[in-house]
Amino acid sequence: MYEDLFHGVDPCINNPRFWEDLFLLKPKMSALEGEISRCTSDQLVGLKDNINTLFAKCVQTLAHEHNIRVVNALLTLCSLVRGLYRKMQGDYGFDFINILIGFDAAEEQMQLLLNHCSNFLTGEYCDSLKSLSLKFLLVLATGTDNISQNTVLEYLTINCNFDAVIQLLSHSSTRNQHGPEAVLYLMLMVNYRKHEMTNPYTVNISLLDDELILNGYGQVITASLADFNHKYSAHFMEPHGSGWFASLTSMVGSMFLSEEMATRNEHIKANDSFLLALYEASEAAPHQPRDSTETPSPATPVEIETCVQPTNLLVTFLEYCSIVMQDTKTEESLSNVKLCFIIITCIAEDQYCNLLLHDANLVFTVPLHRLPMRHRKVVPERTTHARPLACAVLDVMVEFMMSHMMKKLPIELFLLNVGITHRLLCYQKRNSVRLPYNWKDLWAALIALAKFLVTNEAYLAKKMNIFQLANQVMNIFNLFITYGDTFLSTPSSYDELYYEIMRMHQVFENMYLMSLRYSRTDGDYKESAQKLTNSLGNIRSIINHFTPKLEKWSQEHSISTLTEEQVLEVVRNNYDSLTLKLHDSLDQYEKYAEKPQHANFFANMVRSILSDTRQSIDFSAFENLSILQELSNST
């Protein structure tokens, strides 16, 4: 029958029942796609009428009362569209639509087709038909490497099926069966010409306020990340997986008992689509105009508000971050961690999310994992007492700093990392939030990072602008110095900050000398070095003020090495005579924007997800007899 279709003559001439018989038979997808692949472009143009008729007959059959015919028609459509996509080899403009549907009929046929798909997704239909409808939508969405060049998707924005797809997430039964594919489809459609048009999928996600659906969306993402976390933890606790090397062998590589680096990367990439779905939800809402008197939309944090549960999306996500960031040696893992940090950046900028992150009554125990390193023992995940989630975010940032100071410095990740820390502190300063956090951990990590940059300046400065990163570090210290009394948890914390600065004064002095040297030359980093020199002013004032006081106290008491308590006493007694400069805009930061800085990153990630999804769409389940039985019973 396929051969008759592709010979270019009307197949009904020899068989008047051709179309009726065609959809009674189970499609042989490889045969239909094979017929298409054997045609030249010119031959396909010549076959346009037959292909248009096949498409129209498929759409017509979707209204049939027998589900077996409906499924056969949908499977035929999947093969037809997929075969033509492959054949057109990148030329997916209007010719594709003309050969598939015909220009004159395209709008009407696509509206009918998408209405049927929406009806199958929302109506009382069997799971097989819902699943196949989603697979067909994914075939449409993944036809081109560059999603914005897929002209077919214009019809999916005109006939937006967002509501039909998103409803699958509101009930546990449909969510468990179809949630991952539904979220994947919505994520892809959000990325169709997202910077060129008002995309209805983006608008709908930003306006979404149905708690059941939001929780369902979050639970689909949580399930994927939680599965990854569980496999890591299970391997870590196994006897054969214990020991230094087993854990270090790049976390996820040995975790899945695979000797192949490619396998490890696949497990990381498998979560890209769900992380991107989380990103689209967290990135959409903050950019909507919002009246300050209104209750913020819960669309941003997705499931974070479900405080009655022992865990939630953000708890799972932060644990996931602590695992994947342990290794950034491959491009896949580096991209994955970057996406994680961008998501946290969006969360840390949002007022509503920050309310939840810092809420003293909304506490969680977040299991975080640490990379085994030479200077510390291998420890399984730390079980800490329940704290506001902002504490866990800071723990993740501190852990990344301490474990990624390497010659091949991932500076973009460090800039995101320090930027997240700065955003949380800005919120705490503006709202006088005293977070129950051990700030010494953060100060120690920032000082260690500063020391690393100075020590490796000769090598690093040839490859990257380390002064920009150093300046961000100093801005955080200046925020603590200038406003710490408004948000540090105890009065003694402010004294401890000064103690740490005095104890590690040589690091700051060396950084000042480095910045001075570069600011006096006409190199690429002159301006950044000048900013760093300026931002070190207060820290140098503190060092220059307290050093003679400490020396005098030592002489008066004949003690050469002072204890911490003795230093703190001198600090407390000499605050009044200290003069500091008030830096402008310490609690200001450049708001996150995807375009232009990260547009290429996301375009490449979507391209990768498109390619992986296209290859993984599997129709083999529809060959099972059980599916036929299900369809017969539901007819």
Image (tube, rainbow, N blue to C red):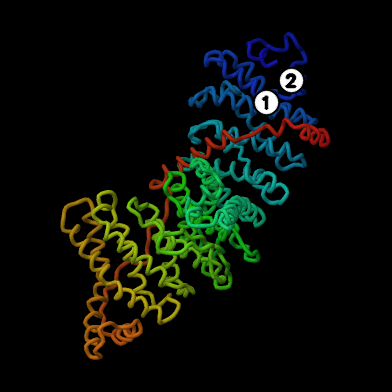
Residue 633 in sight: yes
Whole-percent x, y for residue 119 in the image: 71, 39
Whole-percent x, y for residue 616 in the image: 59, 35
Q: Residue placed at 58% from the left, 72% from the top?
A: 361
Residue 199 in sight: no
Q: Which residue is mark 1?
A: 76
Q: Residue placed at 56% from the left, 56% from the top?
A: 236
Would you say the residues marked 1 and 2 are in contact, meaning their CB atoms lie under 8 Å apart?
Answer: yes
Q: Which mark is first along the chain, 2 or 1? A: 2
Number of other residues with Cα within 10 Å of mark 2, as a class: few under 14, some 14 to 19, many 20 or more:
some
Q: Quadrant of residue 71?
A: top right
Q: Nearer the viewer, residue 368 or 35?
A: 368
Whole-percent x, y for residue 368 in the image: 52, 62
**Residue 58 badge:** none
Q: Nearer the viewer, residue 379 or 484?
A: 379
Whole-percent x, y for residue 2 in the image: 67, 16
Number of other residues with Cα within 10 Å of mark 1, as a class: few under 14, some 14 to 19, many 20 or more:
many
Label 1: which secondary element: helix
> Looking at the picture, which amino acid does disc 1 mark?
Thr
> Looking at the picture, which amino acid does disc 2 mark?
Leu
In screen coordinates, is 593 left or right of 563? right
Label 2: which secondary element: helix
Q: Which residue is mark 2?
A: 22
Q: Quadrant of residue 375?
A: bottom left
The correct choice, above or below, for 344 with respect to 31 in the image is: below
